[in-house]
């Protein structure tokens, strides 16, 4: 079942740091006030053993320290974003911002600060009473233990946050997840539209976007519902990740006329691409990392070679044998992802920027050789095409005959 537009929006909202921080803050406030509710269940003898200033002093220390740690953590996050932008690619920043460990840590610190603040205010106003102070003391001890565990995780996580290897690994994981999801639903739950030109009936009404941007999400279920009620068929002409503008149609409708605004609402267009329904975006981001590593200013051959290996794993995930879901929405026809486009996204820029470097050329030819041997009918011709093209670029860029010979020998095995 394809994700509806609202499910997709909800998933995006829950990845934002303010959402998790807000939930932790509400939980902290509720926890701090639970002592007032539980005070009738605490015996007076137990409450007398805890001094009036004990909880107040602990909460004061907690509030001041958590504010300092939160400020430091935020500055560390900004530094990690800056490092990822300059050393990897700005397109990878969204994955760092959606990192669950970082969000949990910051939410814990903010929640602990609010817990302490609300606790101090409630103590000052006498909200808790003698018995309620016992509950607050016990909860405070638990919060301190939770903070210690979070700090230890944060220290370990800081050693990797924003690093090139860590960031490229996150991009690879996002790309593989999107590839496997699309492999399971190659037509987003609809039927295949193999040719966007001849496959669309001549009498179909074509609808263009009202704004310029990238298609981020297509609500195939909503399109099918509209088409089913009108006894029509909808043809998707722009996949997620492709550019939309008012001069080109993104949808076509055959049959009864459907309200144009309702159809266009099923297609979300934004100013940047998204990893969710766009497997090609993750591949493009990995390629950007390799191109930046191969630039004269960076000259990081190891990263470029590492990215070629990651691209190999992403494309190997597309070739995995998986049982595709049955089409759930026969009223909607969706174009497939073309293997040639995936290979172009992955290898054109690397072959161009690394044409004169034998280490990159060898790794690229070996990756293409592996892909040509995978169990996918379109992989062998695509791999041979790119191996031949990469070799031609290397023949022009390289000066040493021995390097050219080494590449020729590997390319001959593709």
Image: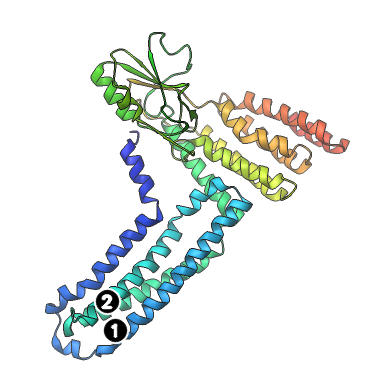
User: From the viewer's perspective, is 186 left or right of 304?
Assistant: left
| Mark drawn on residue 119 | 2
> Residue 296: x and y, percent?
75, 47
Label 2 secondary element: helix
Q: Residue at x 20, y 80 (%)?
A: 125
**In which quarter of the view is residue 350 placed?**
top right
Q: Is residue 259 above or below residue 90?
A: above
Instruction: Report the residue that reaches farthest toward the top.
Output: 202
Position of the N terminus by quadrant: top left
User: From the viewer's perspective, is 83 left or right of 239?
Assistant: right
Q: Nearer the viewer, mark 2 or mark 1?
A: 2
User: From the viewer's perspective, is 289 left or right of 244?
Assistant: right
Q: Which residue is mark 1?
A: 55
**In which quarter of the view is residue 409 placed?**
top right
**Total numbered labels placed on residues in the image:** 2
Decide: marks 2, 1 in contact (CB < 8 A)? Answer: yes
User: Is residue 414 in view?
Assistant: no
Q: Nearer the viewer, residue 264 or 236?
A: 264
| Mark drawn on residue 352 | none
Q: Residue at x 38, y 46 (%)?
A: 12
| Mark 1 surroundings within 10 Å by alpha-carbon count, few (fewer than 14), some (14 through 19), many (20 or more) | many
> Residue 304: x and y, percent?
68, 45
> Residue 174: x and y, percent?
49, 44
Spatial CA span between label 2 and label 1: 9 Å
User: From the viewer's perspective, is 370 left or right of 137?
Assistant: right
Q: Residue at x 61, y 50 (%)?
A: 88
Q: Nearer the viewer, residue 404 or 116?
A: 116
Q: Nearer the viewer, residue 171 or 318?
A: 171
């Amino acid at each position: 079942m394809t994700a509806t537009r609202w499910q997709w929006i909800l998933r995006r909202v829950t990845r934002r740091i303010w959402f998790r921080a807000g939930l932790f803050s509400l939980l902290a406030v509720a926890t701090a006030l639970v002592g007032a509710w539980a005070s009738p269940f605490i015996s007076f003898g137990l409450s007398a053993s805890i001094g009036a200033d004990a909880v107040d002093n602990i909460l004061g220390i907690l509030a001041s320290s958590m504010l300092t740690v939160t400020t430091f953590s935020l500055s560390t996050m900004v530094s990690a974003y800056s490092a990822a932008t300059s050393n990897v690619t700005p397109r990878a920043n969204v994955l760092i911002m959606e990192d669950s460990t970082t969000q949990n840590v910051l939410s814990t610190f903010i929640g602990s600060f609010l817990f302490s603040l609300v606790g101090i205010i409630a103590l000052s106003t006498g909200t808790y009473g003698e018995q309620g102070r016992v509950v607050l003391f016990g909860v405070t001890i638990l919060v301190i233990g939770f903070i210690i565990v979070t700090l230890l995780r944060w220290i370990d996580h800081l050693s990797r946050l924003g690093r090139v290897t860590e960031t490229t690994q996150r991009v690879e994981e996002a790309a593989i997840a999107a590839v496997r999801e699309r492999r399971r639903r190659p037509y987003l739950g609809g039927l295949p539209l193999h040719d966007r030109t001849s496959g669309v009936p001549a009498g179909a009404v074509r609808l263009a976007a009202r704004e310029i941007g990238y298609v981020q999400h297509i609500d195939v279920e909503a399109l099918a519902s509209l088409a089913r009620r009108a006894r029509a068929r909808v043809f998707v002409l722009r996949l997620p990740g492709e550019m939309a503008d008012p001069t080109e149609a993104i949808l076509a409708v055959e049959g009864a006329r459907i309200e144009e605004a309702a159809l266009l609402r099923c297609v979300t267009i934004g100013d940047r691409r998204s990893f969710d329904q766009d497997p090609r975006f993750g591949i493009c981001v990995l390629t950007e990392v390799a191109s930046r590593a191969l630039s004269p200013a960076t000259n990081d051959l190891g990263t470029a070679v590492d990215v070629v290996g990651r691209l190999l794993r992403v494309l190997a995930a597309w070739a995995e044998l998986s049982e595709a879901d049955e089409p759930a929405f026969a009223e909607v026809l969706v174009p497939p992802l073309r293997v040639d486009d995936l290979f172009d996204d992955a290898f054109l820029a690397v072959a161009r920027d690394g044409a004169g470097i034998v280490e990159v050329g060898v790794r690229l030819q070996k990756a293409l050789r592996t892909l040509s041997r995978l169990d996918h009918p379109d992989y062998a011709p695509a791999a041979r095409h790119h191996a031949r093209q990469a070799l031609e670029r290397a023949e022009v860029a390289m000066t040493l005959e021995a390097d050219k010979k080494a590449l020729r020998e590997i390319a001959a095995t593709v």
